[in-house]
Image (spheres, rainbow, N blue to C red):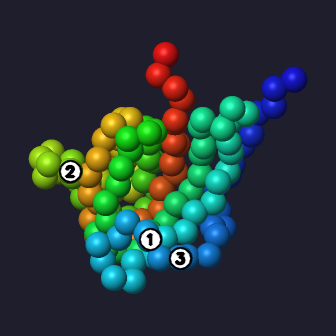
Amino acid sequence: MTEHKVFNDLASIVLENFKDKPTSLTAGQQEASSILWTSADGHCKIGVWECQPGHFTADRTSAGEYCHIIKGRATVTRVDGEAPREIKAGDLLVLPQGWKGEWIIHDHMRKLFIIDASPNL
């Protein structure tokens, strides 16, 4: 039997300890996250992530990401510098598989994320 899950108050979910962000271009920028659910095949993960203000690169070559912004504000730009988008609390950001670019977090951010690494059919 397949069970459903409910996660309440995403703004208050306790995250793992903050650690240095590996792709940061800003010295000392840190992030924390907590995985809430993983699909049986391991291709899909849902979690909550936080990051301090700063600038970092992101590569979604092997998986797409869907981000519901819970708090904070950022600018997300493709790797070619085109199509900058401002995102803030309440917004949904879709980064399709193959997307590469940069984030500039202006205000401490928390987001719900869904990473989908399902093989292309």
Give amino acid for label 1. Lys
| Viewer can see residue 40 | yes
Q: How many marks?
A: 3
Sequence-first disc among 2 and 1: 1
Q: Residue at x 52, y 36 (%)?
A: 116
Sequence-first disc among 2 and 3: 3
- In this view, the residue farthest toward the top is 121
Q: Which residue is mark 2?
A: 79
Q: Position of residue 99 (x, y in %)?
A: 31, 41
Q: Position of residue 106 (x, y in %)?
A: 28, 70
Q: Are the residues at dot 1 and dot 3 in contact (C-beta closer than 8 Å)?
A: yes
Q: Secondary structure at mark 2?
A: loop
Q: Which residue is mark 3?
A: 19
For residue 96, above or below residue 54:
above
Q: Secondary structure at mark 1?
A: loop
Q: Are the residues at dot 2 and dot 1 in contact (C-beta closer than 8 Å)?
A: no
Side of 39 where 64 appears, left or right: left
* Label 3 CA crowd tier, 10 Å (few <14, some 14–19, many 20+): few
Side of 43 where 84 appears, left or right: left
Q: In which image quadrant can residue 118 be found? A: top right
* Label 1 CA crowd tier, 10 Å (few <14, some 14–19, many 20+): many
Q: Secondary structure at mark 3?
A: strand
Q: Nearer the viewer, residue 110 or 35?
A: 35
Q: Residue at x 64, y 54 (%)?
A: 35
Q: Which mark is residue 21?
A: 1
